[in-house]
Amino acid sequence: MKKKMWILLSLATLLFSPNLAAADCADLEKFTNWAREDEHTVVFYNGEIPLARVNIPYCQILPSSTIRLSKSYLCDSDNIVVDGKTCSIMMVTVLY
């Protein structure tokens, strides 16, 4: 009985928290440029090929912003530096 309850609880957790099951990571080692999609979202490119869309909700990204990666392989909840300020990434969506 306890084993069945544990399995049901595990399945319910996955169903009700899709971010845990669908967390993306992107290898941005080869990115050459980025484009601002809105004030909290950027898309990283390798030439003209989009690599990943990164949502950074607590930092404002301006067209003139400077973005520095803390590491080349970024996942949800990693950090990125925008205009000298360390910001937490909410979501990484792989585009390749």
Image (cartoon, rainbow, N blue to C red):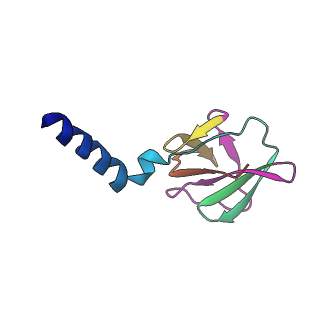
Q: Is residue 57 magenta?
A: yes
- Quarter in which the N terminus is drawn: top left
Up/down of 28 relative to 16, above or below:
above
Apparent side of residue 47 relative to residue 9 in the rendered image (left or right): right
Up/down of 72 relative to 11, above or below:
above
Apparent side of residue 53 relative to residue 17 in the rendered image (left or right): right
Give x and y (percent) for residue 53: 65, 54
Apparent side of residue 20 relative to residue 5 in the rendered image (left or right): right
Up/down of 14 relative to 64, above or below:
above
Q: How many marks?
A: 0
Residue at the image position 60 percent from the left and 39 percent from the top: 74
Give x and y (percent) for residue 75: 56, 41
Residue closest to the far left? 1
Segment colored magenta: 46-72
88 or 17: which is nearer to us? 17
Residue closest to the far right? 47
3 or 61: which is nearer to us? 3
Residue at the image position 50 percent from the left and 51 percent from the top: 90
Give x and y (percent) for residue 9: 23, 45
Q: Quadrant of residue 27?
A: top right
39 or 5: which is nearer to us? 5
Residue at the image position 61 percent from the left and 43 percent from the top: 81
Residue at the image position 71 percent from the left and 61 percent from the top: 36
Q: Quadrant of residue 55?
A: bottom right
Give x and y (percent) for residue 95: 70, 52
